[in-house]
Amino acid sequence: MIRALGALAVVAIALTLASPAAAQSARWRVFPETGFTVADGARGRFLSAFEAHGGVAALGYPASRPFVWEGFTAQVFQRAILQWRPERAEVAFVNVFDRLHAAGLDDELHARRQVPRPVAFADAGLTWEEAAALRLKVLDQDPAIRRAYHATAGDPIALHGLPVSPIVDMGNHLAVRCQRAVFQKWKVDVPWARAGDVTVALGGDIAKEFGALPDLAALQPDVAVAVPSRAPRIVLDPGHGGAEPGAVSAQPPLIEKEVVLAISLAVAEELRAAGYAVTLTRESDRAVNIDRRDLNGDGWVDVDDDLQARVDVANEAAADVFLSIHGNGGPPHLRGGAVYYCASCPGTEHRQFSLRIRDALSAVLPTLGAGLFGSGLFDEADLGKPYGHLFVIGPKTPRVARANRATAQALVEVLFLSNRTDAAILATSTGRTAIARAISRAIQEHRPR
């Protein structure tokens, strides 16, 4: 833990991972969106740490290759910098904004990025617990910023560090600087947030922007050619996650959130191998709105805000194709798949894309013993959802602050977890792989490279 708070010590917080022996298991993943690779291997278990802490949704895309920084291997992500500590076989967060302070960049951060300058706290002689409590007390100045700081799946101090400034009025927003993050509460609507929203600055990108990293060569992508800017952009949305399990099967024991994540990851792997730019709304068993923010502005933080977070991921990625992947639940005699599209939404591709998904599943499901697929194509308005539409593929409503702008949108229920035969298919890797490949083919047929 951080001990020398008053001196703004440059210290990292450990992320709990596996034993040293596990570090010898090499695996990697290339991110064509930025051209960098994240790996588990001799230089550290960065991929495991990335996945354990929420993947792209939580840390952003990788923004550097691994490089040596003050004797330790580090890797930059958009939102954070991770460091491998071999003596503990752990990955740690780096105190990015403390490093920027040590480099003498406070005035430049203030001028260019409206980051508050750090201040001295009267914590000399205090225990670490007392000093931490003193610093955390500054968050009481604004309840929304305090909630955003503490609304994490794990230890907020480990993720953000402790405050090193009070909450400062920066004109169009209030801001507080922490050791690894800057929280900004907006007073007015801006392109990336609404008035009242609290956003978190991208610490890794800021460190790159301000030239604080020692190895410029590491900022060059691993791959010779990144994905072209006009490569089709696909967003896959594995339904549910975290505290929202979705449908369940007692026999065989299955949970929808886990099944659809496995299928979505397999679809993503197929598409990336074919050269597509793929973003997932979640890459692990977690909520998408991990910071528990009121994203649709209705005064509550609930499931609707998690759905809005999924839509926001699609919009931020400028998705050409958006597919939300689910498993169904209902009376035990119901079987087969269903594909939904928004007939009343702007654009002409939603139904065409949904037909391709339906046809692909119609071809593969009977080969798995899933029975007749039937028509399997439905207007989502017939589901009778609040305000008449599904959230993630419907129009703007009082629930939906920002509607999905993807050119082609659909929601697929692959099979019924509540039916024993369907569930038995989903319980096998053969069944999940066949469904994933069918979905991948349908996407590629709809949006060829």
Image: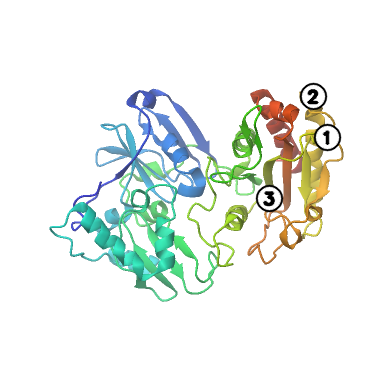
Secondary structure found at label 1: loop
Q: Which of marks 3 and 1 is in front?
A: 1
Are the residues flagged by discs 2 and 3 in contact, CB closer than 8 Å?
Answer: no
Q: Residue 183: where, in percent of width, then height?
A: 40, 62
Q: Nearer the viewer, mark 2 or mark 3?
A: 2
**Crowd band around label 2 with a 10 angstrom C-alpha radius: few (<14), some (14–19), many (20+):** few
The quarter holding residue 404 reads bottom right
Residue type at mark 3?
Answer: Asp
- Mark 2 and mark 1: Cα distance apart in space: 11 Å
Residue 9 is tagged as: none
Q: Which of marks 3 and 1 is nearer the N terminus?
A: 3
Q: Residue 51: where, in percent of width, then height?
A: 47, 38
Res 61 visible: yes
Residue 367 is tagged as: 2
- Give the answer, above or below, for where 262 lies relative to 176: above
Q: Earlier in the sequence, mark 2 or mark 1?
A: 2
The coloring applied to the image is rainbow
Nearer-the-camera pick, 373 or 129? 129
Which residue sits furthest left?
Answer: 125
Are the residues flagged by discs 3 and 1 in contact, CB closer than 8 Å?
Answer: no
The quarter holding residue 347 reads bottom right
Disc 1 designates what residue? 373
Secondary structure found at label 2: helix
The C terminus lies in quadrant: top right
**Crowd band around label 3 with a 10 angstrom C-alpha radius: few (<14), some (14–19), many (20+):** some
Res 274 visible: no
- Give the answer, above or below, for where 256 lies relative to 253: below
Q: In this view, does 124 lie to the left or right of 333?
A: left
Disc 3 designates what residue? 320
- Mark 2 and mark 3: Cα distance apart in space: 30 Å
Secondary structure found at label 3: loop
- Mark 3 and mark 1: Cα distance apart in space: 27 Å
